[in-house]
């Protein structure tokens, strides 16, 4: 939270009353650390805070675990854009470099760091940079940079830029898969792909990031959508390639879905307005739904399943919903019809 000009504070504290069975060792004290103002993402219980030239990694005890500073002088024209992806024990940082002089080429830079220690394990340059005010989305070491000038797909594992598209509208809620970037396009919800540019999945718009999953040969996509008649739904697609896709089920809900759906075993969790849902992954049938108490100015925009309970948060509110779940689920969906079983992670 902001505490003054260019200053902020990160806190670690219980946002909700302890649930005795789940919080036997819960501590009631509040921990805090003063930090520079910047952008944050969380990963494996740590906060990754990016400023113009520095990354700070902060643990749950509000201690600075490690930090990384861009090399060179402070006025050399390089600016950190943030932690843009995590994969296989590494965190990927993106920066823009605008060297002095009108003829100098703008470039993007990618730093690969060990996520536990901050040790640099790789470095690469992206010619032409990432565009103006880019947004990033990543999965399994593939990073997409989305800006007004187009979409760049960068394979951080292989340290190479795969492709760049021309100008396309991908504003609300981008979600990365290894081969596609799913988002609301100019004419509906669809995917951006290098060779085919775009694949339209429907005229609806996304209300939250989609959740792609699957194996090398079989894929699924959970898409929160809203159509022209203002009907909000969660839709499950299956596909081997997007041009050969089918809709498995569609679940209409009263309010817009505001969080990326979470898959766990044979269940899907999501938030629609102030209602938390658990539905069957195979059929879309509602297993249960729970209405939570929110103030008029509050909304839930993030959802995670941690230690057998759902944690929905957003705008200064955290809601915890206890549920009985299999701690190590395996099968997610069996689509049948020769399509095979899809597997995924918690």
Image (tube, rainbow, N blue to C red):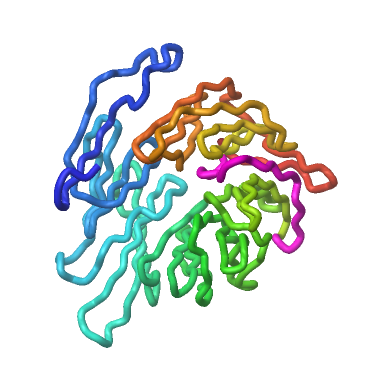
Residue 77 quadrant: bottom left
Task: Determine which quarter of the picture holds residue 191.
Answer: bottom right
Question: 94 left or right of 192?
Answer: left
Number of residue marks: 0
Residue at the spot x=24%, y=55% of the render? Answer: 51
x%, y% of residue 260? 53, 44
Q: Is residue 186 above or below residue 287?
A: below
- Using the image, determine if residue 273 lies above or below residue 54: above
Q: Which residue lies furthest to the right in this view?
A: 337
Q: Where is residue 121 in the image (x, y as percent from the top left)?
A: 35, 55
Q: Is residue 292 above or below residue 339?
A: above
Q: Please give left or right for residue 335 compared with residue 137 in the image.
A: right
Q: In the rendered image, which quarter contains the N terminus?
A: top left
Q: Position of residue 93 (x, y in %)?
A: 35, 57
Q: Does the magenta stretch include residue 244?
A: yes
Q: Give the percent coordinates (x, y) of residue 117.
A: 30, 43
Q: Which residue lies furthest to the bottom in this view?
A: 103
Depth check, front residue: 244 or 341: 244
Residue at the (25%, 86%) spot, across then down: 102
Query: Left of 4 or right of it: where is 249?
Result: right
Magenta-colored stretch includes residue 316: no
In the rendered image, the quadrant that contains the C terminus is: top right
Q: Which residue is drawn at 57% across and 57% down?
A: 178
Q: Give the extent of the magenta segment.
A: 242-261
Q: Residue at the spot x=61%, y=40% of the render?
A: 254
Closest to the observer, 133 or 128:
133
């Amino acid at each position: 939270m902001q505490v003054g000009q260019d200053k902020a504070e990160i806190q670690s504290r219980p946002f909700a009353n302890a649930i005795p069975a789940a919080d036997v060792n819960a501590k009631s004290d509040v921990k805090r650390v003063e930090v520079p103002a910047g952008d944050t993402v969380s990963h494996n219980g740590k906060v990754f805070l990016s400023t113009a030239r520095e990354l700070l990694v902060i643990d749950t005890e509000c201690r600075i675990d490690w930090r990384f500073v861009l090399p060179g002088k402070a006025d050399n024209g390089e600016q950190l854009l943030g932690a843009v992806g995590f994969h296989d024990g590494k965190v990927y940082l993106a920066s823009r470099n605008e060297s002095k002089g009108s003829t100098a080429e703008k470039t993007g830079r990618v730093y690969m760091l060990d996520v536990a220690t901050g040790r640099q394990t790789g470095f690469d340059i992206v010619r032409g940079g990432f565009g103006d005010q880019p947004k990033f989305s990543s999965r399994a070491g593939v990073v997409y940079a989305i800006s007004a000038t187009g979409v760049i797909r960068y394979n951080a594992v292989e340290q190479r830029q795969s492709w760049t598209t021309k100008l396309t509208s991908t504003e609300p809620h981008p979600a990365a898969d290894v081969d596609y970037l799913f988002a609301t396009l100019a004419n509906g919800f669809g995917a951006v792909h290098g060779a085919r540019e775009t694949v339209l999945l429907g005229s609806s718009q996304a209300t939250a990031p989609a959740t792609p999953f699957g194996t090398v040969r079989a894929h699924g996509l959970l898409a929160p959508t809203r159509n022209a008649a203002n009907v909000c739904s969660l839709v499950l697609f299956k596909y081997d390639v997007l041009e050969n896709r089918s809709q498995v089920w569609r679940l209409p809900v009263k309010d817009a879905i505001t969080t990326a759906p979470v898959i766990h075993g044979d269940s899907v969790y999501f938030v629609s307005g102030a209602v938390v849902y658990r539905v069957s992954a195979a059929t879309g049938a509602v297993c249960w739904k729970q209405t939570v108490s929110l103030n008029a100015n509050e909304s839930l925009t993030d959802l995670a399943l941690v230690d057998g309970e759902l944690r929905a948060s957003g705008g200064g509110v955290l809601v915890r919903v206890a549920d009985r779940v299999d701690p190590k689920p395996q099968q997610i969906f069996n689509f049948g019809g020769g399509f095979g079983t899809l597997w995924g992670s918690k």
